[in-house]
Amino acid sequence: MYLALFLYGLLIEPDSSANLVPLNTADNWLHLGLSAGMIALGAVLSRRPRPRRANTAALVPGRNAGGAVAPLHPSGGASAQP
């Protein structure tokens, strides 16, 4: 968007009736700087590889490696307290 405003400011004369958005030379430089900064940030920040996470379900107590809830007792059922 800022690059489009910069180009618009270059092509349209500041005093013409086609200048619907009141832009001047300072605005043109501002829009050029903002667009260059945003493009640079987008290029730098999007090129980072995402870290791979380990299977954390295996590390959670009470869950098995597949993420399902593990039984409470080796017999497969909950113990009944008298």
Image: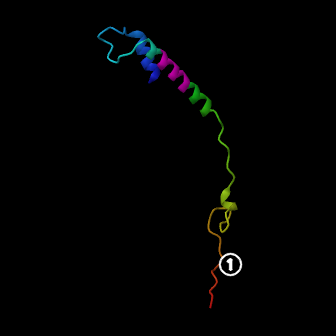
> Farthest bottom residue?
82
Q: Position of residue 8 (x, y in %)?
A: 40, 15
Q: Quadrant of residue 16?
A: top left
**From the viewer's perspective, is 39 left or right of 47?**
left
Residue occupied by mark 1: 73
Q: Is residue 4 magenta?
A: no
Residue at 60% in and 33% down: 45
Q: Is residue 32 left or right of residue 48?
A: left
Q: Quadrant of residue 48?
A: top right
Position of the N terminus by quadrant: top left
Q: Residue at x 59, y 28 (%)?
A: 43
The residue positioned 69% from the left and 52% from the top of the image is 54
Residue 38's x, y, as percent? 53, 26
- At label 1, counting other C-alpha atoms closer than 10 Å, the crowd grade (few under 14, some 14-19, many 20 or more) is few
Task: Identify the magenta region.
Answer: 29-38
- The number of callouts visible is 1
Give percent across and percent down for residue 3. 47, 20
Above or below for 65 versus 21: below
Identified at 70% across, 61% down, the residue is 59
Q: In this rendered view, identify the residue nearer to me: 29 or 7.
A: 29
Give the quadrant of the C terminus.
Answer: bottom right
Comparing 24 with 77, the one in front is 24
